[in-house]
Image (tube, helix red, strand yellow):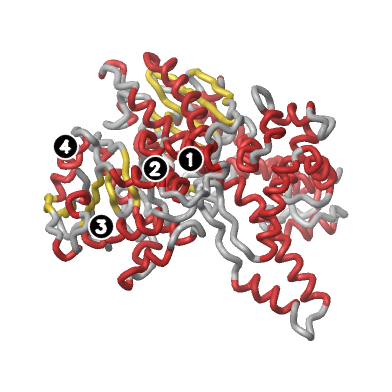
């Protein structure tokens, strides 16, 4: 059984995609379900075997209301998010996405109203995947060496070959027939192409990310508002009247103005502050703290204190607390794929950071625990696996990778190892990092060749692609103009300098793109696998529940937070050991899924406790 969806007015049209395969769109007769009965219809199909893969226009448009009703789905295919990947990937056949004169803008922008949440930025949608469908990817990667062997593979068909479902409702610009047609176009664009196995896995993982993002918002991160308020009072002073500064900020500002001899100076005005510093002999190009710390003027310390307090007030002060923390939960809006590399972004609430000084406010519910796990040196390990650099992988096996690099003889200290690796991935050519990078090139030639080749491709204006198939955007028209200007007969040294700088900048971008993007893919696979494992642990009794996590998550362990290479799981105490095991096993599974049997490990620092600041 399979289903595709779309709708108008108060009704939703469901198309059985399996039964409709090979049938002209005009001949399809959708089943019409009243919008009010959609949740029950989805729940009924989710209770069956096999459970369907829902094909819908935008997860953020459809899923939150289901979660609010306690209805979770196992997997889906998000058309808009997958379209964005396929439209840009050099591994796909993008021409098939526009067959029949379909306008790209139909799927390139997210313009659907999301109930009870601000509209997400473009491409903020996703779907969920079943690892059983995609397990052959690991074998294909291992068998082919690099996995780009041109075979369609079982994973490609598995991504769409079991049960499918699609839905549409009022406000969705794509009707059921168009959603169904777009799904077929996407399957055509990602089937029978070089790297099809990987590309299918990327679509599934990216889609899983959006389901996870919606679920984390629904369940929320446990947050004690009274603890947060006490921290603000301790650090900033009592809450000020509207328009006034907290007393400790005001004191730091007064000391800064006095030291600079300018009582009326507006410290939040960068140009005015810089002029005042210059008049006092503090010649800095910006007010970044690392530049200010190089000077010993009496204004430096109170200015740094003011800037630190100002960041806390603006990013996580009383206004933030009132807007984003309700009923004991912090519920940010995550945006899967919000960065060109595939990393997540946030459209509100500062979801991509929890300042260390506020972690004491993250407290599990009574009878529950927090599991916090982060991956040690994720990006360098991903680089070793992508490059098939066995020496670099061996340096991190069972140990701190930077310590292993020291043991390899590449550098003399752990700090130098870290500087060298970061310099390699971000294109450092000067300073200590630039000095150390050639030493890495000698000891780990395969890893360095991968990022060096990516940098050269970017400098030429070429596109680079992550392990699973997300491609970098092409150079901007401005970049091409700079390169063209430097080749003209009347080009001067300034034109040549601009062209070289633009080429180097793009090379640094593409150098990092392949590594950061693949690390994001690993993280998505980790979370998607973990989500399924946590679901298999089952629920606890109502007496042990956490009602503030909502109908869908009040009685089961669930993902509560994610940041690049760190996750937080909120779990009943009865499930804490099993949940911790699931976290570890999912990390190992993600490595195998992406890189087959290549001997690279992804060790976790895993902590279990009641409060985040205890861990």
Left or right: 80 in relation to 288: left
Element marked by disc 2: helix
> Mark 3 sits on what residue?
180
Count of marks, rendered view? 4
Image location (x, y in percent) of residue 413: 82, 30
Which mark is on residue 140?
A: 1
Q: Nearer the viewer, mark 1 or mark 4?
A: 1
Left or right: 170 in relation to 157: left
First in residue order: circle 2 vs circle 1: 1
First in residue order: circle 1 vs circle 3: 1
Q: Residues within 10 Å of mark 3 (few under 14, many from 20)?
A: many
Q: Are marks 4 and 3 in contact (CB under 8 Å)?
A: no
> Mark 2 sits on what residue?
155
Q: Identify whether 534 is placed above or below 518.
A: above
The answer to whether residue 234 is seen in the rendering is: no
Q: CA gap, disc 1 to disc 4?
A: 35 Å
Nearest the viewer among 514 and 257 is: 514
Q: Nearer the viewer, mark 3 or mark 2?
A: 2
Q: CA gap, disc 1 to disc 3?
A: 29 Å
Q: CA gap, disc 4 to disc 2?
A: 27 Å
Q: Residues within 10 Å of mark 4 (few under 14, many from 20)?
A: few
Q: Residue furthest bottom?
A: 490
Q: Residues within 10 Å of mark 1 (few under 14, many from 20)?
A: many
Element marked by disc 3: helix
Q: Residues within 10 Å of mark 2 (few under 14, many from 20)?
A: many
> Mark 4 sits on what residue?
44
First in residue order: circle 3 vs circle 2: 2
Report the residue at 28% width, 36% height from top.
72
Image location (x, y in percent) of residue 55: 28, 50
Q: Nearer the viewer, mark 4 or mark 3?
A: 3
């Amino acid at each position: 059984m399979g289903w595709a969806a779309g709708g108008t007015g108060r009704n939703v049209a469901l198309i059985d995609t399996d039964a409709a395969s090979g049938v002209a769109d005009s001949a399809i007769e959708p089943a019409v379900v009243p919008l009010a009965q959609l949740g029950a219809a989805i729940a009924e199909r989710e209770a069956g075997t096999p459970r369907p893969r829902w094909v819908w226009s935008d997860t953020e448009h459809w899923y939150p209301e289901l979660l609010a009703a306690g209805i979770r789905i196992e997997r889906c295919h998000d058309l808009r998010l997958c379209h964005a990947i396929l439209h840009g990937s050099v591994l796909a056949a993008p021409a098939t996405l526009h067959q029949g004169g379909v306008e790209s803008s139909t799927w390139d922008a997210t313009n659907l109203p999301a109930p009870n949440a601000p509209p997400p930025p473009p491409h903020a949608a996703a779907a969920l995947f079943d690892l059983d469908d995609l397990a052959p990817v690991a074998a294909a990667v291992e068998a082919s060496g690099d996995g780009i062997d041109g075979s369609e593979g079982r994973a490609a068909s598995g991504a769409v070959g079991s049960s499918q479902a699609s839905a549409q409702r009022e406000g969705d610009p794509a009707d059921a027939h168009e959603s169904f047609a777009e799904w077929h176009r996407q399957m055509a664009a990602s089937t029978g192409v070089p790297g099809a196995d990987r590309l299918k896995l990327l679509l599934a993982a990216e889609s899983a990310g959006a389901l996870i993002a919606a679920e984390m918002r629904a369940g929320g991160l446990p947050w004690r508002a009274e603890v947060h308020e006490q921290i603000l009072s301790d650090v900033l002073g009592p809450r000020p009247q509207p328009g006034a500064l907290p007393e400790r900020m005001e004191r730091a500002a007064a000391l800064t103005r006095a030291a600079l001899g300018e009582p009326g100076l507006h410290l939040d005005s960068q140009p005015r502050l810089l002029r005042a510093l210059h008049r006092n002999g503090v010649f800095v190009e910006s007010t970044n703290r690392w530049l200010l710390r190089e000077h010993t003027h009496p204004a430096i310390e109170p200015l740094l204190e003011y800037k630190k307090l100002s960041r806390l007030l603006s990013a996580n002060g009383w206004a933030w607390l009132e807007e984003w923390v309700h009923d004991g939960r912090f519920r940010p809006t995550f945006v899967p794929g919000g960065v060109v590399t595939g990393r997540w972004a946030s459209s509100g609430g500062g979801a991509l950071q929890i300042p260390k000084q506020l972690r004491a406010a993250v407290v599990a519910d009574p009878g529950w625990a927090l599991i916090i796990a982060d991956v040690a040196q994720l990006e360098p390990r991903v680089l070793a696996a992508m490059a098939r650099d066995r020496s670099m992988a061996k340096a991190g096996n069972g140990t701190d990778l930077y310590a292993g690099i020291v043991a390899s003889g590449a550098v003399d200290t752990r700090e130098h190892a870290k500087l060298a690796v970061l310099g390699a991935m971000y294109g450092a050519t000067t300073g200590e990092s630039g000095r150390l990078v050639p030493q890495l090139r000698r000891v780990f030639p395969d890893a360095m060749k991968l990022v060096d080749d990516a940098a050269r491709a970017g400098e030429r204006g070429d596109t680079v692609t992550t392990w699973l198939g997300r491609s970098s955007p092409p150079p901007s028209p401005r970049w091409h103009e700079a390169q063209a200007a430097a080749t003209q007969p009347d080009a001067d040294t300034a034109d040549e300098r601009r062209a070289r700088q633009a080429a180097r900048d793009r090379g640094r971008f593409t150098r990092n793109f392949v590594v950061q993007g693949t690390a994001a893919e690993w993280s998505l696979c980790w979370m998607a696998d973990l989500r399924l494992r946590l679901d298999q642990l089952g629920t606890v009794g109502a007496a042990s529940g956490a009602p503030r996590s909502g109908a869908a998550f009040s009685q089961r362990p669930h993902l509560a937070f994610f940041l690049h290479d760190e996750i937080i799981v909120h779990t009943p105490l009865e499930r804490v050991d099993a949940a911790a095991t699931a976290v570890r096993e999912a990390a190992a599974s993600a490595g195998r899924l992406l890189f087959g049997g290549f001997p690279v490990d992804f060790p976790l620092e895993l902590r279990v406790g009641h409060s985040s600041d205890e861990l």
